[in-house]
Image (cartoon, helix red, strand yellow):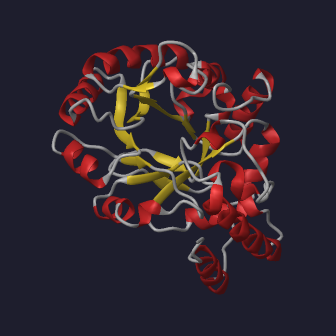
Amino acid sequence: MEYRQLGKSDLNVSTIGYGAWGIGGGPFWKTEGEENSIRSIKKAIDLGINFYDTAPVYGFGYSEELLGKALQSKRKDVIIATKCGMVWQEEKLKSIEKRATRGSIIKEIDLSLKRLRTDYIDLYQVHWPDENTPIEETMNALLQVQEEGKIRYIGVSNYSVDQMKESLKYGQIVSLQPMYSMLERDIEQDRLPYCIDNNIGIICYSPLASGVLTGKYDENTRFKDWRGQGILGNFTGEVFVSHIKKVKQITKIAQKYDKTLAQLAINWLLHQQGVTTAIVGVKTPDQVEQNMGAVGWEISNSDLEEISDILEERCC
């Protein structure tokens, strides 16, 4: 396993991170059961994955609880990243709202610490920007819990360049967590260059485009879960059909290396300038092992050029 320094921190994180969104279950995903989830976490530890990313909203606290249970005996050997700023009134998707106020963050941090069975969090990230709360208030709250020793470093997720600039007026942020994959490359326009110039680590979520880059879907797929509701990503209409066409072409390149499409997609992402780690969601030990096939090899320059040509084809 390769490790990289995360921005202006002393955190050396594995290039493949354990994404704990899926093991949280509803309202977003179905799980493979608690036993399989914990076994997958322990398998990840055995294979050298030291970065574990979660959030309170993943399963309404359940994801954090599972990580806390599985990682407690290995706490000093792992880096735990969780988030704040997403709260809920009841355990339903529609009740989730963005709230990054001082009061909410002060309350959330203690709940996360309890669920994770730890007295500190290595990386504490604002999950989504809260347009109704001044960034100064959010940052001051984060700096307070950092001063109290409850968190080591501050990160942000889904922030724009302007929002990162505003955050840096009040304190240090060491990372940005954006959606980034072969099929979702918007951050290359401004956020990626800004992070490179300012030594802000990039923690990529959805490196497999929520399953599309596994190759198991086709243009006739109709998602009945959150992916079909236009919440995040492109899983319907002409853009989705275009994605599937690209997937079919890139799969042929993966086969040249005797790799799966997913392994090629992760490898490609990890070789993009500025990327620190890719958070890959897993539910079983087998999936963890499969992800390890993404590291330890190189894509040739000619194939990188061919992939680039495929990805730049316009959808409509």
The percent position of residue 175, horizontal first and vertical second, equals 38, 47
The percent position of residue 170, horizontal first and vertical second, equals 17, 39
The percent position of residue 134, horizontal first and vertical second, equals 20, 33
User: Is 281 drawn above or below residue 85 in the view shown?
Assistant: below
Give left or right: position of 225 versus 51.
Answer: right
Q: Is residue 22 visible?
A: yes
- Residue at x-position 29% and y-position 35%: 131
Give left or right: position of 97 versus 181.
Answer: left
- Residue at x-position 54% and y-position 41%: 231
Which one is nearer the viewer's eye here, 309 or 144?
Answer: 309
Q: Residue furthest bottom?
A: 302
Which one is nearer the viewer's eye here, 241 or 87?
Answer: 241
Q: Residue 307 occupies which quadrant of the picture?
A: bottom right
Q: Residue 132 occupies which quadrant of the picture?
A: top left
The percent position of residue 248, horizontal first and vertical second, equals 77, 69
Which one is nearer the viewer's eye here, 154 or 49?
Answer: 154
Which one is nearer the viewer's eye here, 189 or 47?
Answer: 189
Can you say which quadrant of the picture contains the N terminus? bottom right
Q: Is residue 266 visible?
A: no
Can you say which quadrant of the picture contains the C terminus? bottom right
Q: Residue 75 occupies which quadrant of the picture?
A: top right
